[in-house]
Image (tube, rainbow, N blue to C red):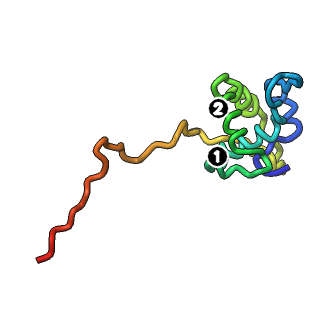
Amino acid sequence: MRRYELTDTQWARIAPMLPRVVAGKTGRPLCDHRPIVNGILWILRTGAPWRDLPERYGAWQTVFARFNRWRGDGTLDRLLAELSDEPAGEAGDETAGHLALPDHIPEGRRRAAPRTQAGPARVVAAPRA
């Protein structure tokens, strides 16, 4: 198990909360949810851009799309609430608390200064005499 990834017991707790992968529907079937969830947790813990997601979690576009879908329908909130209810581990347990998420998960990146309609002022050098 890699750092920030779900243990088998954690996965057993949240797997029933996820939408079922149903065969026979039209379109492309959903891939396994476990690497997707691990990829979402990796992004939330590291704060890295989506494009920097390691390939072992699948295509970043897939993980991002599933993140947005689950965030919109409340699935992600239920998953994180279930994982945060986990009791603290023993003193020697290396996996204890490894899913602690930061208090602030940014909704989007914001610029430090507001952008104006006219854009930045141009600096024109005075002609040399």
Q: Nearer the viewer, residue 11 or 123?
A: 123
Label 2: few (<14), some or many (≥20) within 10 Å?
A: few
Kind of residue sitting beneath label 1: Trp
Identify the residue at the far front of this view.
Answer: 26
Q: Residue at x 77, y 34 (%)?
A: 86
Q: Residue at x 67, y 28 (%)?
A: 69
Kind of residue sitting beneath label 2: Asn
SS under mark 1 = helix
Residue 91 at x, y = what percent?
81, 48
| Residue contact between numbered discs 2 and 1, judged by CB atoms under 8 Å | no
Identify the residue at the far bottom of this view.
Answer: 129
SS under mark 2 = helix
Horizontal side of residue 119 vs 66, given as left or right: left
Label 1: few (<14), some or many (≥20) within 10 Å?
A: some
How far apart in space, not on screen, are marks 2 and 1 (Cα)?
12 Å
Decide: is 76 above or below 62: above
* Residue under numbered circle 1: 50
Q: Residue at x 75, y 29 (%)?
A: 82
Residue 111's label in the rendered image is none
Decide: is 124 above or below 33: below
Q: Nearer the viewer, residue 69 or 124?
A: 124
* Residue under numbered circle 2: 68
Q: Residue at x 81, y 29 (%)?
A: 14
Of callouts 2 and 1, which one flags the residue occurring earlier in the amino acid sequence? Answer: 1
Residue 31 at x, y = what percent?
82, 35
| Corner quadrant of residue 74 | top right
Residue 71 at x, y = what percent?
65, 29
